[in-house]
Structures are given as structure tokens and as C-alpha cells.
Image (spheres, rainbow, N blue to C red):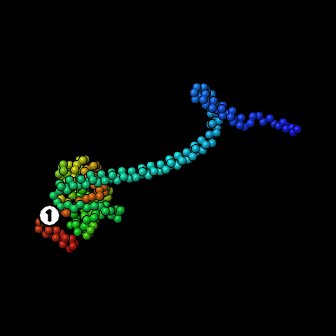
Amino acid sequence: MAHTPEPFFNTGPSPFVRLLFFALLSLAILILDARFRQLEAVRQVVSVVLFPLQRIAAAPVSLFERVSEFFVSHGELRAENARLVHDHGKSAILTHKNQALEAENAHLRKMLQAREQRKEPLTLAQVLYTGRDPFSQRIIIDKGTQHEVQNGQPVIDAAGVVGQVTRAYPLLAEVTLISDKGHLVPVLNVRSGLRSVLVGTGQHGALEMQFVQQNADVQKGDQLVTSGIDGVYAPGLPVAEVVSIETNPASTFSRVICRPLGGVGNHTRLFVVRGSEAMPPRPAEDAEKGARSRRGRKGG
């Protein structure tokens, strides 16, 4: 009769029995928890116990996500910063352009008002560039002899006299500013009626009245206009304002510094006065005296 020896290891219940047991246990626990809510406290305790393990298990993934988010956010911030800097630069350029356009529009409105007030025919010209000589105050405008611009014609803006055409070409003209060193403009003091001559000093913001005696009626703030005695500038054009008067006991004359009223070196649009009242010719007696004096100088 065959004898089956006992197993060396005690294996316990069979796998099927185990599966059936745990299946029934799970089903009972599900019914107990779903119907009677008896495992809430157990669930909370288990969740508290397992929470550190969950955090430790999720730590590598969380760290990787944070590092990735940091680099992505850093790159996005740099790109956003570069875009904002670029937009700021464009906005600043547009703002400056708008300010320049607003200033030019305001100047053009004043020019139109001045044009309506003037009786002489005017030619609107644009300043192209300044002269090449750094020691002279000259500009080049875009109007020439084809636009009836001739040598000697005065150039003004909405505020006053700017200069005089000294060279006219077919399409361009050279304008010598009243601030040019040695340029002369006969003027009249509006308040006192004193006639004098303004001389350019070579600086945009300074003119000087010559041969003003120390007892002459000149005050700070006096307005000076063209007197018209030279036959070039029409009378009554605003020229300058007296800003300072310097006296020297050793000199007979005072040094009177004036500020030009016109936009000397400021604006890009100017008026060329094409017509002015013709002055009557000098008397014949003066002409004969001038001829005799010239003959006398030649004979000497």
C-alpha cells in the first residue's frame, strides 16, 4: 500500500480558498462602508499614516516639475521683459514723433495766422540744412528763383524776422540769419521811437544794438521792430527784445544785448517776403555829392 509523505513546508489553504476568502472580505467591507459608514475613522487614520509616504514617493516628480516650471517661467519672463523693452522703445519713439508733430502743427497754425495778417506776398519754404561754414549762421531753404525768391528778400516766421536771402539758385536759396556775425538790421524801439542798428553776434540767442549812447531811452524789455530805412526789411516787422543793458564809464556807448523774437535756428518752416514797398530814389543832390566824394577819394 502506497504512502504519501507529508509536505516538508506547511502551505496552508489553497489559492482558491484564499481568493474566495478575501473576495468575500472585500465585499463585506464595501457593504459595511457603503451602508453603515463604519470605516470613516479607519480611512482617516490610514490617510494620516500614509501621507508622509505619499509625499516621499511624490517628491521626485514634484521636484522635477518645480525645476521645469522655474526654467520655463524664467525663460518666459526674459522673453516678456525683452518684448516690454522693445514695446517701450517703440512707444517712446512714437511719443517723441507725436510731440514733434504737435509742435510743428502749432507752429504752422501760427504761420497761417501770420500769413493772413501780412499784406505782402509770402512764399512758404522749408529749411533743408544749415550752411557748411561752422562760423556763419546760414541755412538753405527749398525755394529758389523759380519760386520768385530773389537776393535781398527778408525771411520771417510767425514771431518775427529770421534773416535775409543772400544767394538765390533755381531751386534753392541761402538765407543769412540775423544772428550771423556782422549782419545788420535797422530797428526802431517801439516804446521810445529810438532808431538803431542790430548786429549779429554769431550766436543764435544774442543780438547787439550798436552806437547806443548811455543816456539813450532804452530799457530792458523794449520791443524792437524793423524801421524800414534800409529798403530791405518792411517797416514794423518784430525783430528782438532788449534783455540787458551794460554801461561802461570809460565808453560813450552802452552795450545793449537783445534776444531775437523769430525762431532763429528753431523751426523748419519759414516765409520769404517776396514783395515790399519800393522806396523812392535818393535826391539828385545826394547822388551828386556821393559822386563828387568818390571822385575826390580817387584823386587823392
Tell me if residue 34 can be seen.
yes
Among all residues in the image, which is located at the extreme front? 1
Q: Quadrant of residue 145?
A: bottom left
| Nearer to us in this view, 215 or 9 | 9
Question: Is residue 295 shown above or below 64?
Answer: below
Mark 1: few/some/many CA within 10 Å (<14, 14-19, 20+)? few
| Nearer to us in this view, 22 or 270 | 22
Residue bearing mark 1: 278
Q: Residue at x 18, y 72 (%)?
A: 295
Tell me if residue 176 can be seen.
no
Q: Percent x, y for residue 193?
A: 17, 51
Among all residues in the image, which is located at the extreme right? 1
Q: Which residue is drawn at 28% across and 63% down?
A: 141
Would residue 231 appear left or right of 258 to someone viewing this image?
left
Q: In which quarter of the image is residue 296?
A: bottom left
Q: Percent x, y for residue 185?
A: 23, 58
Q: Percent x, y for residue 157?
A: 24, 56
**The C terminus sits in image quarter:** bottom left
Say what amino acid the circle numbered 1 marks: Ala
Among all residues in the image, which is located at the extreme left? 284
